[in-house]
Amino acid sequence: MGSNMAEAHPVGFQWVVEAKSRGARVIHIDPRFTRTSALADTFVPLRAGTDIAFLGGVINHVLTHDLDFREYVRAYTNAAFLVAEGFEDTEDLDGLFSGYDAETGTYGRDLWQYESAEQARTEREGGEGGGDSAMDQERTSPMGHGAAGAPLSGTTGDIAQDPTLQHPRCVFQILKRHFSRYTPEMVERICGTLPGQFREVCEAWTANSNRERTTALVYSVGWTQHSVGAQYIRAGSILQLLLGNIGRPGGGVFALRGHASIQGSTDIPTLFNLLPGYLPMPTAGSHEDLPTYLDDLRSPTQKGYWAGADAYLVSLLKEYFGDNATEGNGYGFDWLPRINGDHGTYRTVMDMVDGKVFGYFLLGQNPAVGSAHGKLQRLGMANLDWLVVRDLAMIESATFWKDSPEVETGEIVPEMCRTEVFFFPAASHVEKEGTFTQTQRMLQWREKAVEPVGDQRSELWFFYHLGRMIRERLAGSTDPRDEPVQKLDWSYAVQGGGAWPEPSAQDVLRRINGYRTDTGEPVGGYTELAADGSTACGCWIYSGVFADGVNQAARRVAHAEQGPYDAEWGWTWPSNRRVLYNRASADPEGRPWSERKKLVWWDAEQGEWTGDDVPDFPKKTPPGFVPPEDATGPDALRGDDAFIMQADGKAWLFAPHGMLDGPLPTHYEPHESPARNLLYGQQGNPTRKVYGRLDNPSNPSPPEAHREVFPFVLTAARLTEHHTAGGMSRQLPYLAELQPELFVEVSPELARIRGLSHLGYAHVVTSRAAVEARVVVTDRMAPLRIDGEVVHQVWLPYHWGGSGLVTGDVVNDLLGVVTDANVFIQESKVATCDVRPGHRPRGAALTAMLAETRARAGVTIETGTTIATAAGVPHLQHTEESS
Amino acid sequence: MGVQRWLESWPVYRQLTGSDPLGRGAAAESPSYTAMRPRTETADRVAGSVCPFCAVGCAQRVYVRDEKVIQIEGDPDSPISRGRLCPKGSASLQLVTGPQRQEKVRYRAPYATEWTDLDLDTAMEMVVDRMLDARERGWQESDEHGNRLARTMGMASLGGATLDNEENYLIKKLFTALGAIQIENQARI
Amino acid sequence: MSEGRDPVTAERSSDEGSTGREAQMFQGRRRRRRGGGEPTVVPDAEFRSYYGRPVLKAPVWEWKIAAYLFSGGLAAGSAVVAAGADLTGREQLRRVGWLGSFAALLASVYFLVTDLGRPERFHHMLRVLKPTSPMSVGTWILSAFGPGVGVAALRELVPARRRHTGPARLLGRLARPAGLSAAATAPGVASYTAVLLSHTAVPGWNEVRDELPFVFAGSAAASGGGLGMLCAPVAEAGPARVFAAVGAAGELIASRRMEQRMGLVREVYHHGRAGKLRRGAELLTVAGLAGTVLVAGRSRAGAAASGLALLAGSALQRFGVFEAGTESTKDPRYVVVPQRERLENARNDANQ
Amino acid sequence: MTSNRLSGPLDDVAGEAGHADHPPRVGFFTDTSICIGCKACEVACKEWNAVPEDGLDLLGMSFDNTGMLGANSWRHVAFIEQPRALGHQDPGFAGLPTGPTSGDGMADAVGPRLREAERGGSELGTSPLHTPNHTESLGMPAFSRPGEGTGAEGRTDFRWLMASDVCKHCTHAGCLDVCPTGALFRTEFGTVVVQQNICNGCGYCVSGCPYGVIDRRPEDGRAQKCTLCYDRLEGGLEPACAKACPTDSIQFGELDELRERADRRLAQLHDIGVTEARLYGRDPDDGVGGDGAFFLLLDEPEVYGLPPDPVVPTRDAPSMWRHAGAAAAAFALAGIGAFISTAIGGRR
């Protein structure tokens, strides 16, 4: 679901094809029949943006028919835990959970907590109410792999529970009630999926999930790029947990990521809210000093491995500031800048438009084409003092000042555009060494094959020398704000001589791995890190990648020459473990659920966990272990606490913490939708960020009027033949020729309605832009019946822009900016649009046409900004004053 | 002898005297085809690499001769990809060696209508100047409640997700020390 | 097809020419064979293709190859006339014949070489002698034919005042055997080009493989004789007339027979440019034949006109056949339908 | 002497071509039932063999923008969208508010227009001429607005076929047989290769190929086609396309082994209900003596642009030469007769 694996990850798809040839059944659930569908056993169409309704339906099917893997659920999830009184569900509040603040559009989550047997739940949460939502946002990590787990104290025994799962406030019953509305009929009305097909999916999924069999769930940005994106993944996880498909071979929820090291760039983030290893950036007000930060991060008495977060943070600071980080100065914690809200890329771009940002670095990134609302991106860049672009080839984001669509409409005039642009040619992947982290968390080292030519340089070189030069400039400064730069440990080894040597990536990796500050000896893993300054470590989850002083990521033992889990190829975080939470592959007693599906198990003779993979559990903790009352950290894990990063040791069906938009996934309509939410009065995600500005208009959605102006559902995605914004594919003849022109896929039905002919021209129109494309009329697209009404979907690939061998309009221009509150990822997988035959207008005529269309649709700055529509709360408009 | 050799180089002669009377195989083969070898055999070295496109992480072998990349193909030893590559991965050679690659720093002055050249050292110095200036102008010492911010909002960064972990590490580290927080990447997109 | 017309309806309303065929083609593809014993009138009812794309590559040969077919035939026909004239003492006819043959030969070589993708590698044709390649066989035949024609023609070119020099006398002595050797290979030259075309996957050429040699040989004779009639005095041109007449008649008969036996590719021989060329060829050849029989023996002008008509007819014949073959590759129908029928027949045979 | 030199099954194809002590015959088995249409084969081939780009035209043939095999595309992935079912696959369209299939809409927009292209569209990447403008209708009766009906008349079945085509490396290769320079030759691996240092671009092979594979590259003048990576084979490497193929749709190996594998795969598919699966080019008794590169197809060959029953022209060569001999004899007789008859008839 939400993944077009055959097209976006063709080489990964070989395993699906192989599994299929061995009898696996492949079901593809997607708005569009793709090359993945062509190879699937079953293709299930649904309306873009309704996956939670679909998954909710499956969850409801599982729960109402008692099809869950009960032993697994009882042992490894929080199904039995009781939620405190005061929690109210969407069933009670017309689509909202308790704690909603209509003013800020956020939840206070103190009402979502477990019922504690004795001591209070988290003090801060309880005390502050909804007021600390901004802080909570920052702590929430995008794709947070267990990081920022709830700082619940003590052991599971503290949480009230009902092992019979019958208590009305136990998670299991809450779940049951929450999803009870998601009937097959409702799925059909919302998703357009017919009951027969839906039942088929339910039956196939449940029949294939038991002791002997597991089901894998694959998603991609078809799930994340929604205003409810994080909850999509939650819904998938809940279902997989109920069916016992997590931590077991052949099971899992697979995020197929789209870029060579996008996993790495979240692990070692260039993200505003994170430090390496999913440690949160300190927040102003809440994290005044190291102790308060650490206390907020984790409770010292917390169970599981997150209890060691203090060691992870201190070791990071030791790496950052070296000897300058001492216990006395809080290891330099005060040298870290503080965040206090949304500083995501879209917020930043709007700040550029508003003149608040002066300089911008684009490092192998092409937002003029690749980010939502391309026009906003370009106008933002046109309002900078300076822009640094580093890329392999000349891309649209570097040349916006002379050839962007806004030059044609007169909105950017080169002679009046102030932005100073530096283009630095970058070294390619074969001209530098370093690691990529692929989608299954595996780090693989790349050797440098050749030297880059001319001015081509690696980012490592660029930033190493920027750092070096800045440090030289500021060496004599007495300004306290320059202290962090002065105190920075920038002593990386370099290769080659001269004034501009290349820094050693190997040395950087060694320091990311971590080392003892006294001997410089590499640590063997994150369990060796300490909070006393005796270790330095750049990213705790990567600790072990340089164990024994060996670059473990560079290992390339042929797969034919090693075991089934290929432990000696590259290095997988954490601890070279392939399957996370693999303790769950064994039953509570430590025996594999079945011989066929064994992965790790308890070896009673040796008194330790063993198996084909590296066990994800304290090696010596026996299955039946019950920790003493005062135990903390890993020692406090019960023998069946398979989810070792969670503060309660359990997988969360219900998330008392960590999600900003609800402890349970709920179907909300996309920000721009042709349909009213059939489940609740609450139309869309009540916490979504709408950025209500004049330059970010929304198409009207129910209950607003005039949705008929944009009657169709728009969705966009990749083609196999191109790569994202095209900078690495549209420039290459061999790829450009394979998909030479932007096209829009429409069904024969829509073609008839709009008078579109195959290979003719059409333009897709939203309140932001009109994009011209060649028409492809195909049976692969089909209309759906949504609550009795026919809804058409159109699809475009989004790879084109103004540069390269093949050019075309920028599909991302069609989108506005609306983001998920948890992770600030934009909703770019679904919007509404119109499709009109023929070429789009050009220049001023285009501007006029768009204005006319907006007027006809009644689009104002308020459109789409009423994020709360449930009964019982004020329906406020969330607009910004646009300058 | 010379005549003999000359004759033998004539396929018709070989047709008449050899095992290929119809001249469709051995007799018609020219010496350069008889001696043909894959160009990868001429490589001075082979570097182990990883495909830079999607996140599957297919292993590549990069064949280098005379300090030029002459071929990039899948590494069959990889447990992930087993030597296979998709069209994008298969186009890696073109990605790396194609004429689209920029080799020189380019500079567009404010209000200019064309690019001009700039040497790398100068460009680096200019970027440092501008970073420090933007940092200064965008500096925020504390918020409206007096909470310490110690940051600058004057500059931002958006990184691709094809950068190495080591690179991302230095980027985040440097910007964090400078107080720049609007440091983002493709993962947010 | 005019721009902007509806592709389907426009074609369906047309019943002639290529668009009509395309309409059939697409109707055909839609109309799967119905069950029961309902006889299908059009055999291509089941025709399907890949977006109507050709299965085969259209020949890369330009008009030069058609010109080569003609000039080669002319060289052969003229050589026969010249050799006969030599043996029978018809000096004018001999002279015309050898010079004509030589000129035609040079032209054919020119056409052949310049049509190569790499003309400078023309001599690579002599690397091998491949019995499976009519072009290779033809090359060697031409290699045998050419020198004889060259020697014989060279003799004709020696100016009268030089005829008594030593080399000229040697040439004179060599000319007859050389000419005869050329004449001996001329039938090969005249007919191998038919194999050259038929020994391809081009339906328009391959399917007429049994008749095409006769058409081409006849055409070569008609053109060779025609040239004699055109350039030699009536008094000497008697054999040329007979040769031309027999050739023309043979060509006409073979051509008719070829059409009768054609399957689906008859369309490409009837329609379009190929059809026009072939109709023109037939008209000119019939006229030339009639003229040859009726007036060429009496009137110099009539002979010239008849000869010219035959030459033109022969040329158009070659261009027509060439064009028809090329056309037959552009539409997958001509490939798929006969092959499909063949398979069906084989299947039916097997089932019986 | 070897029998079946011109047509029919031939056990030792390299031996027949005079290669002593040759390796086993190799080839491709392309199992189109697992092709994902990614076109890695096309790119990998071009990268290895430095085949030029072949045009940046949107062809409107589903996702196929290559068109067909040719001088500048030695692998070509065909895409076919059909309103019929694939085995037991559930395409998910039954019951949706659809109207009639667009059916041959793509072909209608592409095929007829190609006829006007110089070489009928048999040149690579030819875009359909005269792209229709938007005022044109689809050419289908708009008898109902979709969704207004009951759905009963809607389209239900659908499948999307993809197949990577390549030179067949025939047992009896039309291109090789007609080549007058010996540029095309049978290698010791049993494959068919154009020697670029020999080819003089006569173009005969282009018309000799019953599959429409080989073509002359205009800017280069020489004939070009798949070499089955002859240089790689010499180094013990597998061809670039097969190596890259993500799903192993393209399988390289010894031909005998591939044929067995293909037979097993066919049986497997038939067992699971994909009864329309069939092998193409597998049969040594076919018109070209079997292909070195053969395919598992899910529809008739012509649907993929392949000839249903190709025959190597050489099969009929003896007959052609007999007819040509007769014609030559007639020609000679006519010539001799002309002079004799004139002599008899008296000199006029």
Image (cartoon, coloured by chain):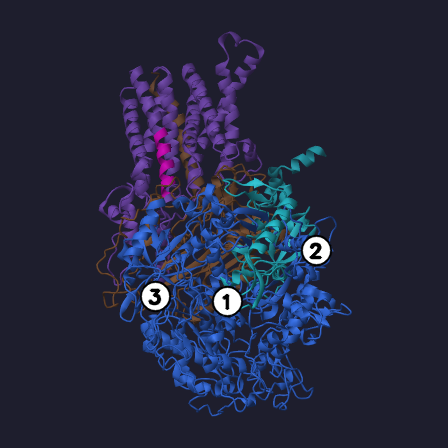
Q: Is residue C150 visible?
A: yes
Rendered colour, chain D:
brown
Q: Which chain is cyan?
A: B
* Secondary structure state at the residue bearing disc 2: loop
Q: Which chain is blue?
A: A
Report the span colored magenta: C315-328
Q: Quadrant of the C terminus of chain C?
A: bottom left
The count of marks equals 3
Q: Residue C325 appears at what percent x and percent y?
A: 38, 40
Q: Which residue is mark 1?
A: A341
Q: Which chain is purple?
A: C
Q: Are marks 1 and 2 in contact (CB under 8 Å)?
A: no
Mark 3 and mark 2 lie on one chain; the one further toward the N terminus is 2
Mark 1 and mark 2 lie on one chain; the one further toward the N terminus is 1
Q: Residue D10 appears at what percent x and percent y?
A: 53, 54
Q: Quadrant of the N terminus of chain C?
A: top left
Q: Amino acid at mark 3?
A: Ser
Q: Residue A382 appears at what percent x and percent y?
A: 48, 49
Q: Which residue is mark 3?
A: A673
